[in-house]
Image: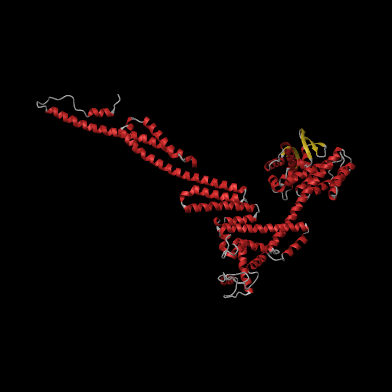
Amino acid sequence: MAIDIFQVGAQLGAPASKASNVRYDNSGQQAVARESSQTGRIIQAGVEQVREQIIRTDVLQANNEYVKRTNDLRMQLMQKKEKGALDIVGEYEAGERKIRSELMAQSPQSVKYGKGAMLFDYSTQQTDNANRRVLGQYRAQQFEAWQNTTYENNQNQITTTLMQNPNDPQALKDAVNKTIFSVEDIFGTYGEERVELETNKALGRLGTAVIKQAIVNQDYTESKRLVRYFNDVLTPDQRNSFNYIINQKEQLENSYKIAQQLYQQYGNDSDAAMAALESMKNGTSSFDSFVNAISGQESGGNYDAVNARTGASGKYQIMPENWPAWSKEAGLQDNAKMTPENQEKVARFKLKQYWDKYGPRGAAIAWYAGEGALSYSEEALNRKQGNGDEPSINEYADSILGRMGTESPKMSFEEGQTVSKIYKNIIKDQEERQKKYNDLLYRKIVGDIYGMQQQGVSYEAAIDWIKSTAGLDIETGKKMISAADYFYGTNGKKGSNKASSTTVKRVNDMLGDHAFATREEYLEFAKEQGLNADQIYEANKTYDKYKEGKGEFAYDWNNDIKYQIVGDIDENPAKEAAWIGAKALLQEWIISEEQKTGVTPPLYQVIEKGKEFITKQPVGYMETRGTFLNRNETVELSLADYKRSGIESVTEIGEDLYSVRLSNGTTEIMNAARLYTITR
């Protein structure tokens, strides 16, 4: 029978139902009642303790399940990223309510009501609060990550749109405005300093992208304008780097133009071109033209000129406060006078520093307004100087560059070397193009003439076609007539004797060893070796494979294949002999595989097949003579042995008897001993 501890407790605390009459004064009855009541209270206390323990156990079990399920829910929700995590707190609340409801439905009465319910609520509240706190922090992190991703995507889209029209001023203005708006939208609540910092970073990145694109497009004028436009948001290192790159590329572009002019004027006559280049070096140098432009702009070349407003003096209008330090830097003594000679030394020294550091325009700006002006905004660079009646910094720089353009350029030694190198590369490129053109032309000539001969076109008709096709191109006509004479001559007649396969292989091996500079040279040599018309036509196609690195020409035979098949063959005749036969077999196998699959076999397959070809197999026995008695030895030969010895095939026709077909078409019957002998 099941016992309900909560009902038993109630019964134990009740008084006895029957009174005792042992004593006449009923004292016995009273004593029994007192004892019974005391016993009931003790038992009641024990029951309460047991019941308390049961409640705690039930609550603990329910709480453990709650912790497990809510933690699982929290971990599941924390798998969501960025935008997907924005509502995880609400999702957790809904899930937690469902978990709590399900647990209440599954739990005993001790957890649902009274003290047990209070304990369960209290114990789960801590877990619930901890989960909410962790999820809130995670949501904040993911929200920030989502904002950053959105921001990055916006910035990338702005940059991509601008790259479609990088030289459009309106497109640039729109991109800048969109960038500023995008920054404010994300960081507007972070304070002005943060907004300014992020705006400068974003505009700097935009400027870097569009400047790089302008450099890639070789638009160096636009590149320099953009560097000035984004001056305030670029770091000093970025500005200096861009100015240096642009200056270097401009110089290289100028060198390339000069080299092209030399080639157009003198062609491949390098002696005449170098003489002309040498004369260019004797003109006024680029730096000298810059110095002259500065002096012309500042004073018109007057060593005694003085600016009444600023006190700047001399031909180059050096400020009085700069003279002591600059003259000392230039190597002059303290208190050096501003003599014409000293003016030249100091001005040239300082201008050369600026020239090397900033290039022509940057040096002009630094001279006019100081090096700090290189970091001015576009607005500041365009502001009139002095009392508003002197050129702006940009106007001054433009004027200097304009003055330099009127001077005849002189080259430095390095610039001359660059021009010379470019000129030689132009010649080399032109020679390569001509070589490629000649190769294609000769390939077509051989194909056309061979086709005519095969179709039965007469020699006279072929010559008439050649004259019509070549026109005034005498060299091409000679090549075509030479091909016609060969194909229509004795060697070119159908059915004429073919060169042996050994001869063809030797010629092609020489081709693979790069023995011929051109197709024409290779085919002419092939003709001299006795290849007939059909073989020459095939040789023409073989040369195509050679140029394309296909077929047997796809590998470096000596370095990639030979060593891996036969190992080191130095002073080892047996290995050398094995390699000769293996290579011939491999060349035939490669051609066969290409015809079957349309693909050149990979190197590892070639090596595996080569090892198969040199693997020796027993073919019989032969008697050898020893010192005291004769003995039989096994004869082992490989396919490579056969190929090297001119044996096409070996067929066993009886015991120790073989039918051997030789490369000359004859067949011999021989035993293993004879077979061994002819392969030595």
Image location (x, y in percent) of residue 376 = 56, 60
Relative to 206, say whether 407 is above or below.
Answer: below
In the rendered view, does 61 fall on the left or right side of 264?
left
Asked if 466 appears above or below 294 in the picture, the reply is: above
Residue 211, visible in the rendered structure: yes
- Residue positioned 77% across, 50% down in the render: 435
Q: Give the quarter of the figure containing the N terminus.
A: top left
Residue at 34% in and 38% down: 122
**Does residue 594 sit above or below 571 in this rendering?**
above
Q: Dividing the image into 4 quarters, which one contains the C terminus? A: top right
Q: Nearer the viewer, residue 9 or 499?
A: 9
Measured as percent of width and height from the top left, residue 18 is found at 17, 24
Please state the horizontal and vertical placement of residue 304, each as a whole percent of the image.
62, 73
- 246 left or right, relative to 635: left
- Who is closer to the viewer here, 97 or 208? 208
- In the rendered view, how is the structure colored? secondary structure
Q: Residue furthest right?
A: 460
Name which quarter of the figure residue 671 lies in.
top right
